[in-house]
Image: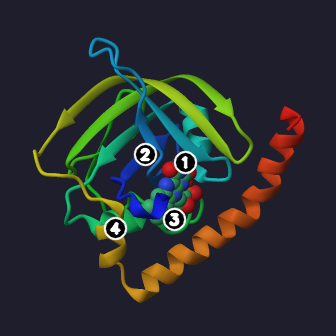
Amino acid sequence: MFRRLNREVWVVTAADTDRRGGLLATYVSQASLDPAAPMVLIGIAANHFTRDLIDASQGFAVHLLCPDQTDVALNFAIGSGRDRDKLANLSVRRGATGAPLLRECLAWMECRVGGAYDAGDRIYYWADVTDGQALSEDAPLCEHELMAAASEEQLQALRANLAHDIQVQRPMIEAWRRRAGS
Ligand SMILES: Cc1cc2nc3c(=O)[nH]c(=O)nc-3n(C[C@H](O)[C@H](O)[C@H](O)COP(=O)(O)O)c2cc1C
């Protein structure tokens, strides 16, 4: 079922005093229907560098990408911000939470964390939207088009990333199940 969905992809960025980074995510949801108090819910893997940055700053930014920004998406999806500055070749400015805001994207929102739930392999953050802007009326880049544009080498790197994540995250979710008593 999930493979048949063609989710939009989001770049989630965050920074603390001397570190910055981001990742590509599909787990970004609208979490409030009140236009006067917009909220989002994001799910970030506990072992990802971006999680450390969100915990440290209690803020993050989410961006939708233009359909031709497949390289930007893959830059954030492959490898860890612990090993390289994923924002090095991108034009960015700092938001109020310190989160890097991509100058080139389809739309962005900056968010301040209000609460979080640790579900073992994922941390779910509820956050208030404090700022945002839509730069284009185009439809956003989605997962199927992203995968179709990736080279064989990039697909291999994504598969390796995923295999590593599953291996690292299995004991995390098992520990959470034991704690939760299920
Ligand atoms: C289509 C796609 C969707 C993804 N969705 C998420 C997600 O919702 N949450 C997450 O933590 N990682 C997600 N990832 C994986 C991260 O983008 C990837 O592991 C990233 O390199 C982590 O970077 P970091 O360690 O620098 O934070 C997704 C990857 C792809 C290709």
Where disc 2 sits, the SS reads strand
Q: CA distance from mark 4 to mark 3?
A: 26 Å
Closer to the chain start, of discs 1 and 3, is: 1
Residue farthest bottom in this picture:
152
Label 1 C-beta lies within 8 Å of the nearest ligand 1 atom: yes
Q: Residues within 10 Å of mark 2 (few under 14, many from 20)?
A: many
* Mark 1 residue type: Thr
Mark 1, residue position: 50
Residue 85 in view: no
Viewer can see residue 140 = yes
Of the two numbered discs 2 and 1 on the same chain, state the one appearing first in sequence: 2
Frontmost of labels 1 and 4 is: 4
Under circle 3, the secondary element is loop
- The residue to which callout 4 is attached is 144
> Which amino acid lies under the numbered mark 4 shown in the image of this protein?
His
- Residue type highlighted by circle 2: Thr
On residue 5, which mark appears? Answer: none
What residue did someone put label 3 on?
A: 84
Neighbor class of circle 3 (other Cα within 10 Å; few <14, some 14-19, many 20+) is few
Residue 157 percent across, percent down from the top left:
52, 78
Q: Residue at point 62% right, 43% down?
A: 52
C-alpha distance separating marks 1 and 4: 24 Å
Compared to residue 137, the image places residue 86 above or below, namely: below
The first of marks 4 and 2 along the sequence is 2
Looking at the image, which residue is at 81% across and 41% down?
176
Q: Earlier in the sequence, mark 2 or mark 3?
A: 2
